[in-house]
Structures are given as structure tokens and as C-alpha cells.
């Protein structure tokens, strides 16, 4: 039975890889990513990274990201990775499962005159693909739902951090998955462990993308907050902060309205978390 599950997991990961190769082609042309505008304004920082930094900054030295080495997990087409470099990060690495995403990331970084190391692979096994440590590791905006389990992911993060190094995840709150991103009725699991969710969608989250995705099958896994926090603790990291946030980076459902952080619910609606953020640190001792 275990072998059959592993085979299905490998097939699901391969399907997601093909899906994100297709998405990358759509996203680089989209208004949402606005690659041309980003490259034209060398001072621009993506909204995703601005939101990440608002949670991460209290855990950084007074100099912020300047001269801190950085690994960006599940970096996609690299706009956010380049934003971290623009904030002063050095020895910047970006890792992603999708080779087509990294193809575009390489092109965009070259156009921005940035030397960034791009690594193709599964975020769960990043420590087997990268032979160095980092002061900072980040991941955000729709990442862990694509990972079947988090124990390997958290252990890899621990092993890739310098002693005293800091990790941040900011992602869609798992309560939205339980509502299938269609508030206000719970229609699916909130808790982890329910297995893979597979569905077909020929669109992506950028504008006017219906019918543009050829590899339409998506495979996702639920990860509740307890699992995320527990996996980081079990890996030996120290949790420094946990936040539940009233905004998110993309208009996941029609009720959302624009706000300085991206998208939020109007005041007439119940106040629920749309994102969560966790900051964790590796002990100063080299354990």
C-alpha cells in the first residue's frame, strides 16, 4: 500500500510541475505580475515581499535584509526573489519545482542585472540540492498546499539555516481551503491528513486566463496551522511569532476589495484570517 501511495504522490508532483510550467507562461504576460513595469522601476518591491517584510522585519537586525544571504523556496518566476535582492539580500538563491518558471526567472534577473542562483527541485528536499547555509529563508503566497507533507520540508529548512538564522512563511490561511475559497460554508477538511485533493482548472489566478492552461489537473494537500507549527518545532526550530492576518495577495473570491496590502474583506463581513505568518529561528548553537 505504501508503494502505491508513493507512486501516486510522484505522479501528482509531476502533474503539478507540468501545471506550473504552463502557469509561468501565462504569468509572465499578465498585468498582475507586470514584469515590464517591475523591470522599468528598479526601486519597485513586489506587494508579496512588502507583506512578508512587515512580519519578518521585527526579527531582523537594524540593517534589515542588507548583506544577509537568502534562500527563497518555491520562488516561481522570480519577481519576489529579485525584490529581496533589491532590499539588500546577498548570495540570493531561488528554488522552484517548475523549470519553465526558472527559465523566466533567469531571464528577468538578467534583465535586472542580478546574479541569482536558481535551483530546480522539490522544496521538501532543498537541503539535498543546495550545499550551503543561509541567514534567511522565506516562502510565501500559495506554497505549502503543493507539498504532500511538511516534516521533510521543515527539516530541510532547519539544515539550510545558519545557526541563529531566521525563517518565515506567510501563506493563505488554511481556513480558506476548508471553505474551498468560497465563504461562508465549510465544505472540506481544515485538519491535515485527509489525503490529496485533485481537481481540473484551465485557468490560473491572474486575469483573463480561462482556457490558457493545457495541463489542467492540480493536486493539493491540506496543512492546518498545528501541522505547520509542529513540523517546524519537531525540526528543532524556535517559533518567534505567529500571526493571523486580515489580508492576502490575490483576489481569491469576489467579496474581497483592494487594500494597501493587496486584498481584504469589507468591514460588513465577519472578521476571519486570510493569511497567516510564522517566523522561526535556528538555535545559535550549531545543532
Image (cartoon, rainbow, N blue to C red):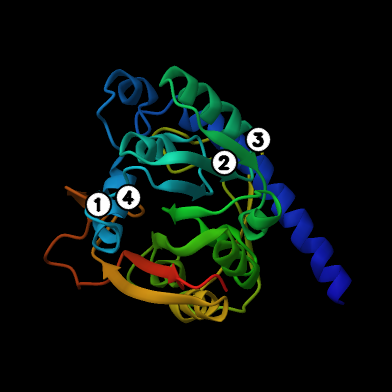
- 127 left or right of 255 in image: right
Q: State how far apart marks 4 and 2 are (Cα).
A: 21 Å
The answer to the question of whether label 4 and label 2 lie on touching residues, with beta carbons closer than 8 A, is no
Q: Position of residue 286 (x, y in %)?
A: 55, 70
Q: State how far apart marks 3 and 2 are (Cα).
A: 20 Å
The answer to the question of whether label 3 and label 2 lie on touching residues, with beta carbons closer than 8 A, is no
Question: Which of the image's four quarters has the N terminus?
Answer: bottom right
- 46 left or right of 139 in image: left
Which residue is tagged 2? 202
Q: Earlier in the sequence, mark 4 or mark 3?
A: 3
- The image shows residue 162, relative to residue 211, as above or below, that is below
Residue at image position (80%, 70%) is: 5
- On residue 263, which mark appears? 1
What is the crowding at mark 3: few (fewer than 14 residues within 10 Å), some, or many (at least 20)?
Answer: many
Q: Nearer the viewer, residue 81 or 128?
A: 128
Which residue is tagged 4? 249
Q: Earlier in the sequence, mark 3 or mark 2?
A: 3
Residue at image position (40%, 61%) is: 168
Look at the image and tell me whether residue 212 can be seen. no
Q: Nearer the viewer, mark 3 or mark 1?
A: 3
The answer to the question of whether label 1 and label 4 lie on touching residues, with beta carbons closer than 8 A, is yes
- The image shows residue 39, relative to residue 159, as above or below, that is above
Q: State how far apart marks 3 and 1 are (Cα).
A: 30 Å
Q: Position of residue 271 (x, y in %)?
A: 20, 72
Residue at image position (45%, 24%) is: 29
Q: Nearer the viewer, residue 181 or 80?
A: 80
- On residue 144, which mark appears? none
Q: Secondary structure at mark 2?
A: loop
Q: Secondary structure at mark 1?
A: strand
Q: Earlier in the sequence, mark 1 or mark 4?
A: 4
Q: Nearer the viewer, mark 4 or mark 3?
A: 3
Which residue is tagged 3? 99
Amino acid at each position: 500500500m505504501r508503494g502505491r501511495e508513493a507512486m501516486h504522490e510522484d505522479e501528482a508532483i509531476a502533474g503539478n510541475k507540468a501545471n506550473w510550467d504552463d502557469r509561468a507562461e501565462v504569468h509572465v504576460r499578465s498585468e498582475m505580475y507586470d514584469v515590464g513595469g517591475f523591470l522599468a522601476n528598479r526601486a519597485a518591491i513586489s506587494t508579496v515581499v512588502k507583506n512578508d517584510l512587515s512580519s519578518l522585519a521585527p526579527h531582523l537586525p537594524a540593517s534589515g535584509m542588507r548583506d544577509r544571504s537568502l534562500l527563497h523556496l518555491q520562488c516561481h518566476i522570480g519577481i519576489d526573489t529579485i525584490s529581496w535582492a533589491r532590499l539588500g539580500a546577498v548570495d540570493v538563491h531561488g528554488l522552484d519545482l517548475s523549470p519553465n518558471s526558472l527559465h523566466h526567472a533567469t531571464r528577468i534577473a538578467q534583465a535586472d542585472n542580478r546574479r541569482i542562483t536558481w535551483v530546480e527541485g522539490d522544496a521538501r528536499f532543498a537541503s539535498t540540492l543546495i550545499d550551503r547555509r543561509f541567514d534567511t529563508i522565506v516562502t510565501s503566497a500559495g506554497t505549502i498546499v503543493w507539498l504532500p507533507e511538511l516534516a521533510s520540508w521543515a527539516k530541510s529548512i532547519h539544515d539550510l539555516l545558519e545557526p541563529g538564522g531566521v525563517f518565515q512563511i506567510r501563506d493563505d490561511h488554511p481556513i480558506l481551503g476548508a471553505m474551498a475559497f468560497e465563504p461562508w460554508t465549510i465544505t472540506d477538511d481544515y485538519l491535515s491528513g485527509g489525503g490529496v485533493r485533485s481537481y481540473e482548472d484551465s485557468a490560473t489566478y491572474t486575469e483573463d486566463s480561462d482556457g490558457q492552461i493545457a495541463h489542467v489537473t492540480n493536486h493539493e494537500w491540506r496543512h492546518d496551522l498545528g501541522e505547520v507549527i509542529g513540523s517546524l518545532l519537531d525540526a528543532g526550530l524556535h517559533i518567534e511569532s505567529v500571526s493571523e492576518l486580515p489580508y492576502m495577495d490575490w483576489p481569491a473570491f469576489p467579496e474581497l476589495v483592494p487594500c494597501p496590502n493587496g486584498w481584504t474583506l469589507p468591514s460588513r463581513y465577519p472578521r476571519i484570517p486570510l493569511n497567516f505568518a510564522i517566523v522561526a529561528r535556528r538555535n545559535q548553537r550549531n545543532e
